[in-house]
Image (cartoon, rainbow, N blue to C red):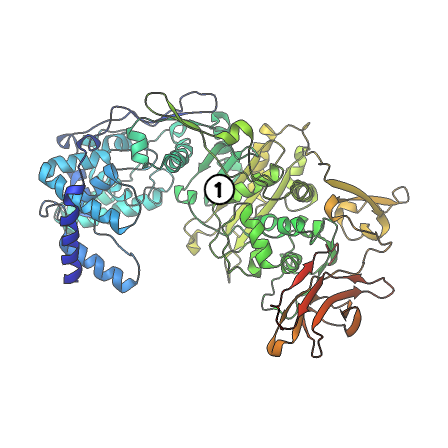
Amino acid sequence: MLVVVIGLGVVLGLIWHSENLDHTKLTPQSQNAIFYDQNNQIITTPTTKKYASLNEINPACVQAFIAVEDRHFYEHHGLSYPRIVKALVNNLAAGYSKEGASTITQQLVKNTHLTNEKTLQRKIREAVLALKLEQSYDKDTILELYLNAIYFGNNLYGIANAAEFYFDKTPAELTPAEGAGLAGLIKNPSKYDPVGNHDNFVTRAHLVLQLMQEQGYLTADEYTDALADPLTITTPKDLWIGTTYQTMALKEASQILNLSESDIINYGYQIETYYNPEQQKLIYDAMNEPTYALAGDKFALLSAPNGQVGALWTSNPTLLTARRNFGSAMKPLLVYAPALELGVIQPETAVDDSPLIDTDFNPHNFDQQYHGIVTARTALMHSYNVPAVKILNATTIPAATDIANKLGMNLTDHESLAMALGNTNQGTTFLELAGGYQTLANQGRYSPTRFVRSIRDRNGNTVYFDLTNKYNYAPQAVAEDTAYLLTDMLVDTTRAGTGRKLSYLNTAIASKTGTTERSGSKNNTDSTLVSYTPEHVLLTWHGNASMRPENDLPRGATGGGKLANAAKQIHSVISDPSVNFVQPSSVKTVRLDAADYAEHTLRLANAATPEHETVSALFANRYLPDTVSERYLIPTTTVINGRLGENNLPQVNFATLPYQTYSIYRNNVLQAVIDHQTGEYTYVDKNPEPTNLYRVDAALPDQTPVSSNEITLRLPTTTQYKAVERKRVPWYF
């Protein structure tokens, strides 16, 4: 530790003269950033920028900040060396950066001069500037500058603005408990947000009060009285409901310009957004309608298909960046979109909803039943889990992961079959989830959420313009036919599946629900409903943000339950019944025999009457079947892969179904017949030729076999082995 400290001192000395303290950054600038809505009207801001001198702040409030942030503030000279050593020891013991050692002086420097990146270079710059700051100003001045510069959440900088916004008071009027609350929230303004996360705010305030008593700032009686303070928040609803949107617009502007959020505020940038005040009030009122009784924390986002966010609201700001598993709401993005894109399925593909065999992952359907042969459309409509796993397995996890990431998901190379149920290694953010559905609604063009349409500097010069807005440019994540076919399936999910509460609106709405159940419990942690029309995408959620068991949703809380009432209220205002999804030319309607299909899907239940001898089915033109069987069940083609295994013997791998027979051919000569197998099968060719062309024919009784793709495996000679694959798209599996 001594070597580390000495080394740090040497480095500080070397760069001492390279860092300059900008005194103009230490005090708030005369201008605030200005936010404009979609109609170029100024969005009402919580407060105008105010400055409070130290003698205008309740001393108990000042003491609260010292108690929780830097108890030795008046003793050190900018850096607390004991805290640095303690933090180094704890971080080395933990194996990661567990805690920091920033003094109030360092925090002032970081908030006014530096970014929030966690790098050694930034920490060294911070230390040097803190030492220079202590040489230039006395302690009271540093403390005053600090209290007027720090961030209090909801786009509020400075103690005077925070006191007015949260408590409708001046800093001098704050009670000890209110001062402790403001001092406590700066550690994590989202987690301890006084409006959106009041319970956490109170708990944190009580911790600060305890520290104040322990350090002699409060007597026992004063401490007891402060604990009894209810910490009532007086923030008007019409001011607060838009701050979440501004928070995200500010964050996006910071990323666009590569500036800190405080710099954007202080330099007076003018940020034009897609904010729609009427939509903002609409989603807030619907999510807080008393008759719906939506339990737990809540989140709602309303956007256009091209990603322009008109409204965003959450009761808990920590959710803005949280990564969660949204259950079956992820299936369209993780399972069905990749399978459709690769031609593994079409909407009417037959899938066997029967128990999984020879696999370590054996989920059950929500209703604890199996439904036999169903179509992919029906499986998605009713959110069956087992067919989703089988479709993902047929698509393969790497292929599905690659396409899902093009839709904006953040999947790793180590995903498992659990992603068929919406469970991924890193989870998904609300904005990523919304972006995936926006892409589907935007004909497959990748459409991440966007809040900022342009930015001007304080002189009115445009420094950024959203070209996507002007030219509707977006890369094609999945083909237009994939987006339409999946949308058509999700329209049926609204019509007769898990989202059917929205069907009463009698308009074109695609939807998907998702429910996440706590492991080992019947309680739910997440309830999600994503729905979209040709004009709007709506994400609604309520759940347990803290993930503490006592905050779980009541049993039976699902995305298609009470949450659907709020979504229906929103869509009833914004949706135009005359606007429909347009079938692209890349999708073809095929007439199929109705009698064989009707019994397997609710969508076609009325088609088997004498006057309806055929039924329509949708196919992507690029994956049209060569023939249509008179029977519903036709042989399912399989996809084979191969390699040279032990002793350079060719190995051919493919998935099997128990009711099919598989004939393995090498160079068009039958080698083996496999039947009564389920799951992955490996055929080892013990008598190969120098060059081996393999295929597998799948057959049902009295049916013409269908062939797999072909692969070539060459034994090692003077030429390096190379696998050649000719793709043939299956229709059924």
Q: Is residue 228 visible?
A: yes
Q: Secondary structure at mark 1?
A: helix
Q: Please, is residue 260 above or below residue 87 in the view?
A: above
* Image point (26%, 62%), residue name: 92
Please name the residue that numbered disc 1 is placed on. 431
Q: Three-letter amino acid code at disc 1? A: Leu
Which quarter of the picture shows residue 562? top right
339 or 82: which is nearer to us? 339
218 or 257: which is nearer to us? 257
Q: Is residue 224 visible?
A: no
Q: Quadrant of the N terminus?
A: bottom left
329 or 227: which is nearer to us? 329
* Image point (73%, 46%), residue name: 622
582 or 664: which is nearer to us? 664
Residue 228 point in image, percent of width and height: 25, 43
Question: How crowded is the residue under tag 1: few (<14 C-alpha within 10 Å), some, or many (20+)?
Answer: many
Residue 438 point in image, percent of width and height: 56, 38
